[in-house]
Each structure stands twice: as structure tokens, then as C-alpha cells.
Amino acid sequence: MPQHRDHLGRPIVAVTGIGMVTPLGVGKTENWAALTSGKSGIKRITRFPVDLLNTTISGMVDFLPSSTKGASALTHELAEMAAAEAIGEARISGDFDGPLFLAAPPVEIDWHDRFALYAAGTEGAGYDRILSAARGLNDSVIEETTLFAAIADKLADRFGISGLPVTLSTACASGATAIQLGVEAIRRGETDRALSIGADGSATAEALIRFSLLSALSTQNALPERASKPFSKDRDGFVLAEGAAALVLESLDSAIARGATVLGIIKGCGEKADDFHRTRSKPDASPAIAAVNAALGDAGMSADAIDYVNAHGTSTPENDKMEHLSLSTVFGERMKTIPISSNKSMIGHTLSAAGAIEAAFSLLTMREGVIPPTINYDNPDPNIELDVVPNIKRSADIATVLSNSFGFGGQNACLVMAREAV
């Protein structure tokens, strides 16, 4: 019988391992040092030609070997590196006795494979010609890169995952959703631990063009490191980026029994769908408000108990406005004085990985007593009154954090985390 239970009698879920890779570097130590110093990982794109593109900047991880091998290979490398660091910190040797929840981007045939298939095809034109060549393949390389579950399958083999590896995609909320699924599996008593990963290596030319056509990306290319400016008056879109974060989740009883270091507690998870538009958020912010309230309710906490908000903070005109409205509604006048910052001002928007990366940074914020800044905040939006911790980190005693993930298609997920179980 679990000894440590929450307000609803469920096992308390602790974090015992954290791993990450972002445009700022490899590993949580390097990333945390860069983030708190206000360093930007946004640079000019060199991976592919950008001569005719409106956006020519991104937060790519070109320092990794798989950065030239396509989105699937890079997502796998990112996930594996983050998982290895998290499992190592949790001091789990041998097979990982628990399920895997992987948030990953939708997959498709990489461009270099499409060109190769087209060249090999003999029937029809366009996509029909590619399909005709694919049917004649005798190897599984291209097939594996287009199977949504292939990356999780490889990770399961690599780390000896005992449960079914689950791959999921809830747009920009995916990383937070992966954590929520791990938390719920432990709460239901199905497992003592789970591995939750958010990984995304899909900053491809095609992705850049698609988001550009949606007018979602920043076109402030002159100074890449200054393009992402959440909550600023002159913000004009997000910066596409890549990265990964992994959390080892464990029942507090299990962590204590094996002498693991508890890095933080996942107190509550909340989600709410928004059917307003395929990409836009509902103007009245009601789904985001509901997601925040659901997370607080799941945690058994009032809004007054939150010390800091890790914002979704994409730097798009509409999303930042909606997030401010949702938080102001939930927290009232107090929201003007609650510190809130956006990691995306430095690492860009890592899409499927964002919720996991921001959860990892939130845990470090509590442990280290330092709030990362929101950089590039030199022209405040007068309609968004927030304490965004502008430009310079701040020392603070933070015991609780709300981390927001508001995704395309109205997929909203929020996490409430605490430094300690009490």
C-alpha cells in the first residue's frame, strides 16, 4: 500500500532524473548555465538553402551527427541522448522497469529520400512515381523513418523498456502530454516508474515553409538572437527550433525506498481541447483557462499557491495575448506581480518537445532558486501587464510552478510542479 499519497489518495509522483538537449547545448548543466545567462541558441540556417524564404533563422541542433540525416534520425538521436542522461541521473541500471511515453513530431518521407525514390521510379509522375519505387524496396530504412512508432520502438530496445512504448502527438502540448500520461500510469498503480520524453528534430525546409505560410514565424532575420521576443510589442512570430527533454517519473515511495534523489514533484496535470480553429486559439481564452484550472484542481491547489509561471510564450501576437488573458482571468490582479518567463525567447519553439523541455527547466528553477529571464524584452506591450523577468535572471525562492503548453488545433496541457511533496 503506497505510504505517500496526494489529496485524492493517489501515489505522489516524483521526478528522479532529467535529461535534455536544446540549441543551447547538450545536457542539463550546459543548458541551465546558458539559459540563466540569457544566451540565445537562435542562429542563421545553414542546413539548407534559404535564399527565397521569408524566414532564414532557427534554433537547430547542427552540432549533432544526425542533423543532416533527416527529421526521424535526428528526433531519435535527441530522444536517446536526453533519455540516457535522465536514466543515468536517476541511477537506474539495467533494464528500465516501466513504460515509455514519447512525444514526437508527425513523420513523413524526408526530402532526400523522396528525390531518391523519384529517380528510381518508372511509373507515372509525382507521388505515384515515388510510390511505385517504394513498393520495390528491399530494405526497411525508409519504411522505418515513416513509421510513427519506430523511434519509440528503438528506444524501448535501447533502454530495456518493460511496458508498451507509446508514441503521441498533441501538437505543441505533446511534451507535457507525455509527462501527464506517465503521471497517470503511476497514479493508477500500473507501474512504479515511467520514462516521459519530448523530442523534435523536424526543423526541416518543409516545416519552415508550412509555418511561414501560416504567418506564424518571425521574419526578423537581421539579428537571429533577438527575433524571439515573447510579450513584447514588436513580437511577430515564433522561431522554429529542435530539442528534447526526458524525465524519469517515479512514485515517491519507490524513490525513497531505493534512495533516489527527488528532483521535484508533479502535483497536477490538466488538459482541455479547443475546437475553435485548426490553428488559432479561441479569442476568449476559455479552453486555456480551463486547462490551467484543471491542473490546479488536479494538484489540489489554489491559484494563490503558485510562485512562478513558465509561459508557453511563443512570441506570436495572438498566442501571447491569449495566454495573458487566460492567466489574468485565473490569477486576477496578482498576475501582474507573479514572475513569469518564456524559455522560448532563448531556445525558440521546439514544438513536440517544448512541454517537456519547459517542465525540466521549471524543475531546475525550483531546485536552483533562479528564475531564467525572458530576453529581448526591450519594448513592452502595454496591453500585457506581466512581470516577465526581463533580460536578466532573478534569484527567488520558488516552491511551486505552473508550466503552460497551448498547442495548434486547440490542444492545451498544463502542469503544476512543486519542489517538495509537502
Image: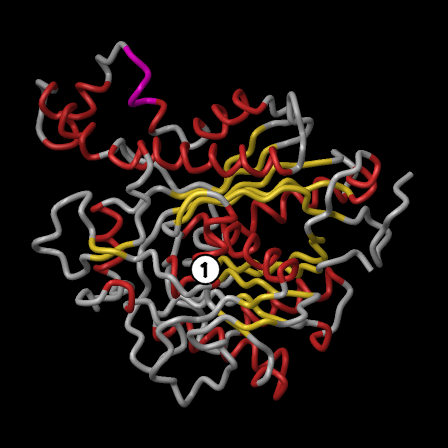
- Helix, strand or loop at mark 1: helix
In this rendered view, identify the residue nearer to me: 250 or 122: 250
In this rendered view, identify the residue nearer to me: 10 or 286: 10
- Residue 224 position, x and y percent, is 24, 63
- Residue 186 position, x and y percent, is 74, 41
Q: Is residue 113 magenta?
A: no
Where, by quadrant of the figure, is residue 213 drawn? Answer: bottom left
In this rendered view, identify the residue nearer to me: 375 or 30: 30
Does residue 302 appear left or right of residue 312 in this picture? right
In this rendered view, identify the residue nearer to me: 122 or 332: 332
- Does residue 278 sit above or below 232 in this rendering? above
Q: Which portion, as a residue range, is magenta?
A: 139-143
Mark 1 packing: few (<14 Cα in 10 Å), some, or many (20+)?
many
- Residue 358 position, x and y percent, is 52, 56
Dominant secondary structure of the residues highlighted in magenta in the image: helix
Pointer 1 residue: 35
Please give the name of the residue rendered at 35% of the width and 72% of the height, measured from the top-left corner: 229
Where, by quadrant of the figure, is residue 223 drawn? Answer: bottom left
Does residue 107 appear left or right of residue 389 in this picture? left
The disc labelled 1 sits on which kind of residue?
A: Leu
Please give the name of the residue rendered at 34% of the width and 31% of the height, measured from the top-left corner: 73
Colour logic:
secondary structure
- Does residue 361 sit above or below 61 in this rendering? below
Which quadrant: the N terminus? top right
